[in-house]
């Protein structure tokens, strides 16, 4: 009996528990904004080249902070793909905003940059590009449209750790960038995230929103003589215990991503004949980008073929999974959102996309087993 190949297996880098013990026993500082939080923020600022980073308890929280920072209110429109996770849209709906869905490209599965300008109205306030599978959107084009129309850009880089677009890290190009350290992502802390603030003018307010709408940070820096309630906000900081876990992962980030990229490469090589025969499509690789090996997916020719292949793999102990139910087709999407143009690729691809197992500790034999099964089952 062959062992099961799971879809994902969270990787533990090694020092997580040591660092948590240090937070608990030595630092005696386990609430938010403690020593490990600051270490993580500095690591991210330095490595990615972000102006300012604030750790959050999730990428969802970072997106919600972004909606607050951009003053999204009732009637304001925010352009984004429908092919994404609910939080991308939910953060703006919480403020009374209206997500406007634009179709994705069939090669990168990211928002079709060419369609964005046409979706802009007098009510548009922001664009939220989602870097699906860690594959960069064309940020030059998106920033160009945003500048021309006076819009904010919030990158949903939940899956984009350490991927680059023309040499720049994802999350550092828009006004704001949101990362996720959820257990299913490349770098993890169970639940976790970060807000990257690239517009220096937004930093002060971001710190206040992060700390329940108070000027606590300014108080501790000695900039004000008492701390008080000065803005709307919430509790978006993670405990320093979570940050301690995360710091152990960040120290290993380059290694983790290199391993994932290697596995991704084995899949691409092993499945290229299947793609050449027109049986499946593989992720598009752009020479201008460095991709972090977050997701290995294939696109089958039909929903029926995907269903059959998923079962074939399941029968052989291999767990492959589909991805998003497009948001425009969900009950909340129909109630609170609007679509611009038709969403042909979004509908098509969500029915035909299948994600294959990919995790740090996956062995070459396991990758080989999946490749063989995909070829035989297609
Ligand atoms: C995972 C994910 C999120 C949410 O991240 P959390 O940290 O779980 O809140 C948001 N957007 C995208 C595109 C994601 O993949």
Image (cartoon, rainbow, N blue to C red):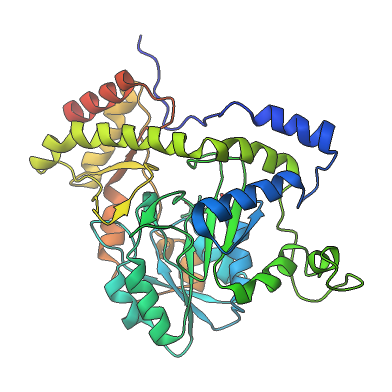
**Residue 52, position in %: x, y?**
61, 62
In which quarter of the view is residue 108 placed? bottom left
- Placement of 183 over or under 49, stated as above or below: above
Q: Is residue 315 left or right of residue 246?
A: left
Question: Visible in this render: residue 101?
Answer: yes
In which quarter of the view is residue 240 placed? top right
Number of labels in the image equals 0
Q: Residue furthest bottom?
A: 122
In which quadrant of the rendered image does the N terminus lie? Answer: top left
**Residue 192, position in %: x, y?**
62, 47
**Residue 173, position in %: x, y?**
45, 66
Q: Residue furthest left?
A: 277
Please state which of residues 228 and 166 is positioned toward the viewer in this rendering: 166
Question: Visible in this render: residue 95?
Answer: no
Residue at 47%, 49% in the rendered image: 161
In which quadrant of the rendered image does the C terminus lie? Answer: top left
Q: Residue furthest top?
A: 1
**Residue 88, position in %: x, y?**
50, 62
In which quarter of the view is residue 194 placed? bottom right
Residue at 69%, 73% in the rendered image: 205
Residue at 70%, 72% in the rendered image: 204
Please state which of residues 76 and 12 is positioned toward the viewer in this rendering: 12
Q: Is residue 12 left or right of residue 307?
A: right
């Amino acid at each position: 009996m062959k062992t099961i190949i799971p879809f994902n297996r969270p990787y533990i880098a090694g020092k997580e528990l040591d660092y948590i013990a240090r937070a608990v026993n030595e630092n005696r500082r386990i609430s938010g904004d403690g020593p490990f939080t600051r270490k993580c923020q500095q690591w991210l600022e330095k490595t990615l080249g972000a102006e300012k980073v604030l750790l959050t308890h999730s990428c969802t929280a970072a997106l919600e902070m972004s909606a607050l920072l951009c003053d999204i209110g009732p009637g304001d429109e925010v352009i984004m793909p429908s092919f994404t996770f609910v939080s991308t849209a939910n953060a703006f709906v919480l403020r009374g905003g209206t997500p406007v869905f634009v179709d994705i490209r069939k090669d990168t599965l990211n928002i079709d940059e060419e369609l964005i300008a046409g979706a802009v109205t007098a009510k548009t306030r922001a664009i939220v590009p989602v870097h699906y599978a860690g594959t960069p959107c064309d940020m030059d084009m998106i920033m160009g449209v945003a500048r021309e129309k006076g819009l904010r850009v919030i990158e949903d880089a939940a899956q984009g750790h350490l991927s680059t677009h023309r040499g720049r890290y994802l999350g550092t190009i828009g006004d704001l960038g949101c990362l996720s350290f959820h257990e299913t992502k490349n770098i993890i802390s169970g639940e976790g995230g970060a807000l990257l603030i690239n517009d220096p003018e937004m930093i002060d307010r971001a710190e206040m929103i992060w700390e329940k709408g108070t000027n606590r940070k300014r108080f501790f820096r000695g900039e004000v003589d008492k701390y008080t309630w000065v803005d709307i906000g919430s509790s978006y900081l993670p405990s320093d215990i979570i940050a301690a876990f995360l710091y152990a992962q960040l120290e290993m980030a380059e290694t983790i991503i290199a391993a994932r990229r290697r596995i991704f490469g084995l899949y691409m090589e092993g499945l290229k004949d299947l793609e050449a025969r027109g049986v499946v499509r593989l992720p598009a690789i752009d020479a201008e980008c460095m991709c972090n090996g977050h997701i290995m997916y294939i696109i089958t020719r039909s929903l029926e073929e995907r269903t059959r292949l998923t079962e074939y793999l399941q029968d052989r102990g291999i767990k492959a999974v589909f991805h998003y139910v497009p948001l425009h087709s969900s009950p909340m999407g129909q109630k609170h959102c609007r679509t611009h143009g038709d969403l042909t690729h979004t509908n098509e691809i969500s029915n035909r996309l299948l994600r294959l197992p990919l995790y740090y500790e996956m062995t070459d034999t396991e990758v080989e087993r999946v490749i063989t099964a995909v070829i035989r089952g297609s």
